Image: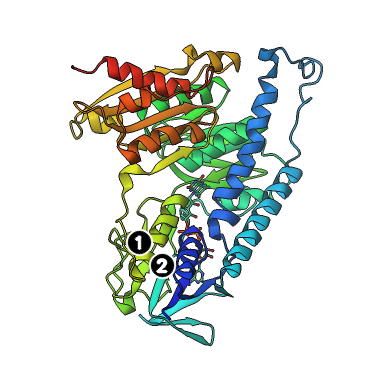
Amino acid sequence: MTKVVIIGGGPGGYEAALVAAQLGADVTVVDRDGIGGACVLTDCVPSKTLIATSVRMNYVTDAAKLGINVGNEAEDKDIVRIDLRTVNDRVKRLARAQSDDTAARVVKEGVRIIPGTARLVDPHIVAVGEERLHADVVLIATGAHPRELPTARPDGERILTWRQLYDLETLPERLIVVGSGVTGAEFANAYQALGSDVTLISSRDRVLPTQDQDAAEVLENVFRRRGMNVLANARAESVTRVGDGVQVRLADGRTVEGTHCLMTVGMIPNTSGLGLEEIGVRLDQGGFVEVDRVSRTSTPGVYAAGDCTGVNMLASVAAMQGRIAMWHALGEAVAPLKLSTVASTVFTNPELAAVGCSEADVRSGKVDARVVNLPLDTNPRAKMHGTKDGFVKLICRQHTGIVLGGVIVGPRASELILAVSVAVQQRLTVDDLAHTFSVYPSLSGSVTEAARSLMQASPE
Ligand SMILES: Cc1cc2nc3c(=O)[nH]c(=O)nc-3n(C[C@H](O)[C@H](O)[C@H](O)COP(=O)(O)OP(=O)(O)OC[C@H]3O[C@@H](n4cnc5c(N)ncnc54)[C@H](O)[C@@H]3O)c2cc1C
């Protein structure tokens, strides 16, 4: 029986454990924080639970536009308000329950879980305290942690990482969010909806600099319209506590004052102290484990998956890397990881979901393709819901019409993108999509409509 030891019980680790157990291996997962990992306990699951509350809050604050009177704002400005302690209690309870459910599932499949911190003694021996685990195959899936700036050390009270937000008892009155990537944008949007006065500090000329430009523009406009103070081209140099609040000093000498500051300035891989370099596992300059497309490291028998590899820091990618590692290690036929079909979402309101190649790839000449962008405000269902912001963008190969990618900005774009994902994965054409029935009226009707308009633009 092949002995597999997995270090880290996040999606990279536990999904790999499930596959290895299914294939008949003797599997042990060592984890120091809880099965589900940071994904379930502190990052993805808690943030999306908080965001669920913030989206409901948007429903209430926008209700008047649909004829619902939720109180006289002039008489009682705080008629709808957040009880942050209740919100955070729910977030933490839900995360813990999700971790417990995942652990129970893994154990049911025959996987042994050892709570503790692991390190490699040699490529086939994993140490956990005094215990030595012998392994034919090792998977490193140790994740990553928030990057901290020496001039802006989080104190857990006023200067915070996203992992410390759920211990706040009251809503930050004036929240400054440093960093306008996915995490910064999601939290800025959520706390704005919950009732905080939010300033978002972006070191670039726009928010969400790595996302589709049209999509980022829609979101930035929505943020500003709702009253968010978005500071572009503003690099935060330091964050200090001043009295009961915080002061952020920008590189150009300006200062921004708030009651709290949330730092979202990237991730550092959890790869130090694991004994990796000592056993020949190559790390890149940022400390990420170097892997190939079947998750092999530079040391035979040692695989790596998830955020510690920095390949694409998403739970879905971590899980796929972990599964691929086990299929490969245990002798199954396996297709290498394909990043061109990964779907991702920015969970703002509206959501931004994308899959496949980008319009930037087309504009730069990297891909020979046609693009259509259909605003949602002409979609009948969107009108019924009072949705004005968003669009469906579809990209197909110039001559064959094969769908290469898409971007959707709108409510529940994370769900709507699946149709485009299936098309990209299965190499469907815009004709295939255009001939697919969508429900009338529906937002997904815009996906088939976008496909129809690309058909019309076809040269023959
Ligand atoms: C705020 C936020 C929101 C996110 N939202 C989403 C989202 O909506 N969708 C999405 O797809 N992705 C999201 N992500 C990304 C997602 O959380 C990560 O990609 C995912 O957690 C990576 O999984 P992993 O298994 O690599 O690591 P992790 O989930 O970080 O798990 C690693 C585990 O390894 C353990 N560990 C570390 N070192 C050791 C050791 N030496 N010994 C034993 N155990 C160890 C850790 O304790 C942890 O339990 C989000 C990230 C952040 C920061």
For label 2, count other residues whose C-alpha is less than 10 Å away and answer few (under 14), some (14-19) or many (20+). many
Q: Which mark is residue 84?
A: none
For label 1, count other residues whose C-alpha is less than 10 Å away and answer few (under 14), some (14-19) or many (20+). many
Q: Residue at x 68, y 22 (%)?
A: 61
Residue 100 in the image: x percent, y percent? 65, 61
Residue 399 in the image: x percent, y percent? 18, 26
Q: On the picture, is 82 further left or further right than 304?
A: right
Q: Residue at x 41, y 61 (%)?
A: 323
Q: On the picture, is 96 further left or further right than 219?
A: right
Residue 74 occupies quadrant: top right
Residue 278 occupies quadrant: bottom left
Question: Does 361 appear above or below 95?
Answer: above
Q: On the picture, is 261 further left or further right than 19?
A: right
Residue 425 in the image: x percent, y percent? 34, 41
Question: Does 151 appear above or below 386?
Answer: below
Badges 2 and 1: C-beta atoms under 8 Å apart?
A: yes
Judging by the rendered image, the residue that carries numbered circle 2 is 271
